[in-house]
Amino acid sequence: MPYIPRSPMLMSCAHCGREFSATNLNRRYCCNSCNVLASYARNGRPGEQAAKLVEAKKQLAAAAAAKTSAKKLAEARKQVAAAIAARRLERGAGR
Ligand SMILES: [Zn+2]
């Protein structure tokens, strides 16, 4: 079967909205930087979740040291757990 190149389609970038032509209809972004920036917008910049985890752990330690109420301590623990989950997500999607 002969190879027949598909004619380029005019598409609009999912990040900046600029129009671009592509033969691959799975393309969503006009360029690599739009792809990367859209990924940052979805998942946060690399290391951002790690910084949040450090901050949440600090708050937990401070809450424990201050012998605050059990409710506040549970809240701080929940934040650490959420930060760990977010960090794991980021690492899983790490590129
Ligand atoms: Zn773009």
Image (cartoon, grey):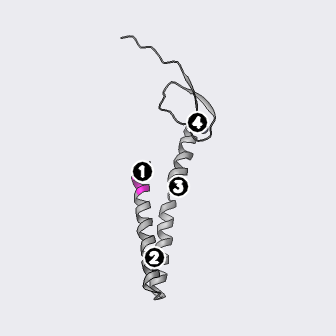
Q: Does the numbered disc 1 mark a residue whose Cβ is under 8 Å from ligand 1?
A: no
92 sits left or right of 41 in the view: left
Q: Are marks 4 and 1 in contact (CB under 8 Å)?
A: no
- Which residue is labeled 1 in the image? 93
Mark 1 belongs to which amino acid? Answer: Ala
Q: Secondary structure at mark 3?
A: loop
Q: Residues within 10 Å of mark 1 (few under 14, many from 20)?
A: few
- Measuring 46% from the left and 71% from the top, which residue is drawn there? 79
- Which residue is labeled 3 in the image? 44
User: What distance separates the C-alpha of mark 1 from that of mark 3?
Assistant: 11 Å
- Which residue is labeled 2 in the image? 75
Earlier residue among tags 1 and 3:
3
**Mark 4 or 1, closer to the camera:** 4
**Mark 2 or 3, closer to the camera:** 2
Q: Does the numbered disc 2 mark a residue whose Cβ is under 8 Å from ligand 1?
A: no
Whether residue 91 appears in magenta in the rendering, the answer is: yes
Q: Residues within 10 Å of mark 3 (few under 14, many from 20)?
A: few
Q: Give residue 55's position: percent from left, percent from top.
A: 51, 71
Q: Quadrant of the N terminus?
A: top left
Figure quadrant, ligand 1 = top right
Whether residue 51 appears in magenta in the rendering, the answer is: no
Q: Give residue 21's position: percent from left, percent from top.
A: 58, 26
User: What distance separates the C-alpha of mark 2 from that of mark 4?
Assistant: 41 Å
Q: Give residue 57's position: percent from left, percent from top.
A: 46, 74
User: What distance separates the C-alpha of mark 2 from that of mark 3?
Assistant: 23 Å
The label on residue 13 is: 4
Residue range in magenta is: 89-94
